Image: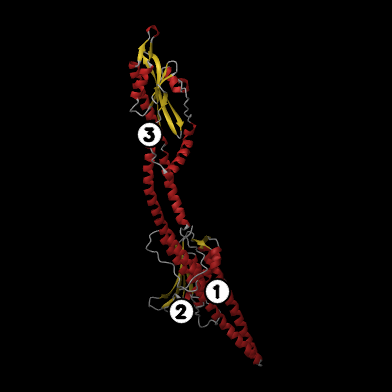
Amino acid sequence: MQTYPYLHIKKRTLSPITRRILAVNLLALGILVAGLLYLGEYRRSLVTGELEALNTQADMFAAALGEGAVSAEGFTGERLVNELVRQMVRRLVKTTGTRARLFNNAGMLIADSMALVGPGGMVQIVDLPPPRLDTGYIGAVLDVYDLLARWLSGEDQIRPYRERPLQKAEDYDEALAALSGDNAGMVRSYNGGMILSAAVPIRRYKQVLGALMLSKDSRDIDETVLQVRLDILKVFAVALAVTIGLSLYLARTIARPLRRLAEAAEKVRHGHHRRHAIPDMSERNDEIGELAKTLDDMTESLWQRMDAIESFAADVAHEIKNPLTSLRSAVETAARVKNPDQQRELMSIIKEDVLRLDRLISDISDASRLDAEMSRAEEAPVDLRPMLATLVSIYTAGDDAPRLRLESGGVDSKLMVNGVEGRLAQVFRNIIANAVSFSPKTGEIIIGVSSADGWIIVNVDDQGPGIPEGKEQAIFDRFYSERPEEEKFGTHSGLGLSISKQIVEAHGGAIVAQTLKNEAGKTAGSRFTVRLPMGS
């Protein structure tokens, strides 16, 4: 098995196109999940709902306290009974999970559901937090995400919660507002979470006797948000697996055939035979299939061009070898011949061979430059009518000129094509010269011009011997020569019609030849037809 150490295509676990597809798909999925995990609006709605629930609960407790924990003090009005307040507060909040603090109208704390007062003094009650659901790596990631989310949403700027040993109403804005007769709520940050508070006035016949403040941490809200996030992450895990699988499949269907095409092209580039072919991907109805077909056509075109170059080189060597052989023979003979007449005849042969070589080399040079020149030349609108009229005038000038006639077939408008004017003139000059060389001196050459279906059609008819049967295509081959008997050998290189065909095809047209027959079925001449796409 042949190896190719010069192949520069690297073998990778993940190709660049695979990485790009994965990056684009995962980035889109990541942005979507990050947005869902943010849950900022959902969290705010939970906080608002919790504050409203605390406010409603506080109103109910305040109404109960206003009825059951108040005593009259003669003319000084009514006041809250501290012992009754403490007992009622503990019973009211026992099942609610909230903390209740009650301040009298002087702003002093008289009851706290988290404090037990006994003979030994006051005992602070602290609820232990439940075990976290988000322990481990996921918990650490979510904690970092929470910090970032709070920073983006501005939650890190919430005033922190502080609790003094001797609490007063003035420590809490909502408590002060409640002592003024207004309901108020407040959210404060505490230990990575929040403390939600709602304060309402305790009234007795419109008299504000104190303020009840209910507080609750954001543990339930955080757990609800966490549970939603975990559900989202579960869906994300499934979506991630599906996305990676589909991305790898998509990349595989793109990257692998592209790599195969690249490796095949590399082998063709470094190979010396046609064994290395472009893979057949015609069953793919997509751009890669079109690319494979185009590369295959291009490779075949390159091989055909190489074959043409090889054939051209062989033909050139053969055609040059003939006059060189004749020249060598004449030179060697001239050295041995003493007769002046024979020497003059040999010198005439040498001169003709030199002229033949010069003409052959000029035509070969013109043919070899043709493709490169046509690729560099810029096309321009060309009117064929004045061009053909000028060529007819040139050939019919003089007393011994052939008979040429230009017929436009009733077409009065311009016959415009897009092309290189000099090369198009060369085509018609070669065809007319060929017709003149084959037509008898009394014969007539007719150049007919017409247009049909977006094409300009030029026919050049002569009255010569016609084209040998089966040679209608061969006459356009390089160095093909079929000359009249009276014409001297070597007058033409045999490249004129081949060059004309190259030029016409480079302009998107076609050139064909055929033998003309008269009514009796006999040969009446030949016709060369040039078809060119009509231009603007």
| Image: 131 above or below 266 | above
Q: State the residue position of label 3.
A: 220
User: Is disc 2 in contact with disc 1, using a CB cutoff of under 8 Å?
Assistant: no
Judged by depth in the image, the label closer to the viewer, 2 or 1, is 2
Determine crowd level at label 1: few under 14, some 14-19, many 20+ residues with C-alpha closer than 10 A.
few
Total numbered badges shown on the rendered structure = 3
Residue 229 marker: none
Q: Position of residue 457 (x, y in %)?
A: 45, 65
The kind of residue tagged 3 is Asp
**Badge 2 or badge 3: first in the primary sequence:** 3
Q: Earlier in the sequence, mark 2 or mark 1?
A: 1
Measure how far apart labels 2 and 3 are at the Cα level: 108 Å
Residue 431 drawn at (x, y percent): 50, 72
Q: Amino acid under label 1?
A: Ala
x and y percent of residue 437 in the render?
A: 52, 77
Q: Nearer the viewer, mark 1 or mark 3?
A: 3
Q: Secondary structure at mark 1?
A: loop
User: What's the CA distance linking mark 1 and mark 3?
Assistant: 112 Å
**Depicted 445 relative to depicted 128: above or below:** below
In the rendered view, tell whether residue 398 sits above or below residue 105.
Answer: below
Residue drawn at (40%, 66%), measured in percent from left and top?
280
Q: Quadrant of the N terminus?
A: bottom left
Amino acid type, mark 2: Pro
Label pair 2/3, CB-CB below 8 angstroms: no
- Packing grade of label 3 (10 A; few <14, some 14-19, many >=20) is few
Q: Secondary structure at mark 3?
A: helix
Residue at point 33%, 24% (across, down): 91
Residue identified by numbered label 2: 465
Q: Which residue is mark 1?
A: 401
For the question of whether residue 403 can be seen, the reply is: no
